[in-house]
Image: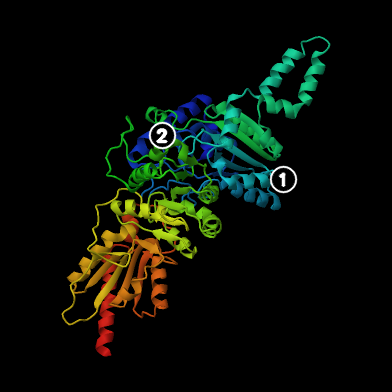
Amino acid sequence: MALLTRIRGPRDLDRLTPGQLAALAQEIRTFLVTEVSKTGGHLGPNLGVVELTIALHRVFDSPRDRILFDTGHQSYVHKLLTGRQDFSRLRMKDGLSGYPSRAESEHDVIENSHASTVLSYADGLAKANQLQGHLDRPVVAVIGDGALTGGMAWEALNNIADAGDRPLVIVVNDNERSYSPTIGGMANHLATLRTTQGYERFLSWGKDALQRTPVVGQQLFETLHGAKKGLKDFIAPQGMFEDLGLKYIGPIDGHDLTALESALTKARGFGGPVIVHCLTEKGRGYHAAENNDEDRFHAVGVIHPETGLPIKSAGKDWTSVFGEEMVALGREREDIVGITAAMLHPVGLAPFAKAFPNRIFDVGIAEQHAVTSAAGMATNGLHPVFAVYATFLNRAFDQVLMDVALHKLGVTFVLDRAGVTGTDGASHNGMWDMSILQVVPGLRLAAPRDADQLRAQLREAVEVDDAPTVVRYSKGTVGPAVPAVGRIGGMDVLRAPEAPADERRADVLIVSVGAMAPTSLEVADLLAAQGITATVVDPRWVKPVDRALPGLAAEHRAVVTIEDNGRVGGVGAAVAQALRDAEVDVPVRDFGIPQEFLDHASRPEILAEIGLTAPDIARRVTALVSRLDVATVQA
């Protein structure tokens, strides 16, 4: 790492010779494989942008020139070149973020890790530069071909093209993939550009050949050159971009530093919006990634650096349980179809796609379109199941509300990575869904506590044909089954205290939500050790609030809700409102995630930081019961 350790900032790249730059690229790939294999992280995307990132930092003067990364999972090389080379705690508490982070460096302008947003940021920055007289400061937006499938990117392109005098360089990092191979019309268009001989190369050949032709050569060349639009679309159909008013340069070999620097230098000097189309290979230089057809090691856990194999074998996870049950349901019901937003494997729909290839729809990174397309399918008699990370459903709230719920359509939303996810940071914690969805009329929301309940509640969800249903679950390994000891209304009773001899009310009703069941039971054990009686129930369906809950709450001195969702507007708030509506006057304490953006760390570390552990909760509930005892004595 002789060269890499000498790079403390982008301008250190200026002193390197072409040979040294090639050696630096190899050092960076070796560093990434060695370090990311120890911690886990986004390996494949970063291996693919090594030369591109070096070229960006040689041509542009960051942070004076703003360099932005869409999604940001391909920013590891950028971190290395801007002085951040301690990857020992990547994505861990007090270590480097897995995405750009403004707290880490002035070179990180935005820290978005939801896709298709960077062009809108760039448009705003370029407009601000123009108003402030900084037209010598180009804005550079790096966006993958996968992110270009998002509608927001095209809304931004429409605006960017409106002003030809704002220096804005759009670098399309085209590796034919998001997580998996990119699909759709945009992907097909880029594929055409990749495989068609370039217009400029054709004109160069034509000028040499035709001008050697007596009499008619020059005239014919000028005629062909004048037919620029039609000829360009025939030879290299970049016309879609140029029709928008965007200069197009490419396609460029994204691993050829000389070609990259030449193209980026031209783009920088153009003075208006330019698209530089770069062809890269995800996972480049790492044999295990290059031969992984699923996702080219888009994201890995801790792996053996030489083989790429996991160091530890994890138990069955929530996602695979869902995937298995979807296949079973697909065999039983021909009307069930699956929808994914460019995440077929991560959300567990790959087995369904293999079993029923005509009943799976990958819409690209287009969550809004996915929801309303699902509404159309439901209108015509299908039952769509849209599997998506909980944090990404935020982007399609209006469609859930107005296109599905308003029309009383049977669409099931399966939310993976709900609750605290940890290492991917603030943007990926699924802490908003149960609050956002509470306001949707008619929507029903299930939070399974274990694998058996996930299977059962998914089946219950797809039986509903007159309203949207939601099933949400955590990231990672699913724990052991948590058996019920009884049923009250639609709620499972997980722990029932012995009836007090003096017929007093039990002390606490604990309402456990989803994966918090083991924590809730531990709280009950800790309270019992203090002589405090507690009933633990799992509502299973947390929206609407079970009709039996207010009556059960009235039999207790206090109610406690425990959820891995934001406290504002979450299940606890809904339970409290239900008790008020039923005029059940008992204290309610809601334990959940505070409404703040949580730094990256492991799930247990975050839960401990926010006080969402059994000892923390039991301590506060004990204090509450003590106050109730004092009040009773004083009364």
Q: Looking at the image, which residue sits at the far right?
A: 215
Identify whether 11 is placed above or below 565: above
For the point 70% across and 53% down, which residue is it? 131
Looking at the picture, tell me which residue is in the foreground, 12 or 402.
Answer: 402
Which quadrant is home to the C terminus?
Answer: bottom left
- Would residue 559 be found to the left or right of residue 497 on screen? right
Q: Position of residue 97 (x, y in %)?
A: 42, 48
Q: Specify the farthest residue to the left.
A: 501
In this figure, which residue is indicated by the disc labeled 2?
294
Q: Position of residue 2 (x, y in %)?
A: 41, 31
Q: Name the residue under label 1.
A: 163
Q: Which mark's residue is nearer the viewer, 2 or 1?
A: 2
Q: Quadrant of residue 26?
A: top left
In-image side of 558 versus 575 (left or right): left
Residue type at tag 1: Ala
| Badge 2 vs badge 1, beta-carbon distance below 8 Å | no
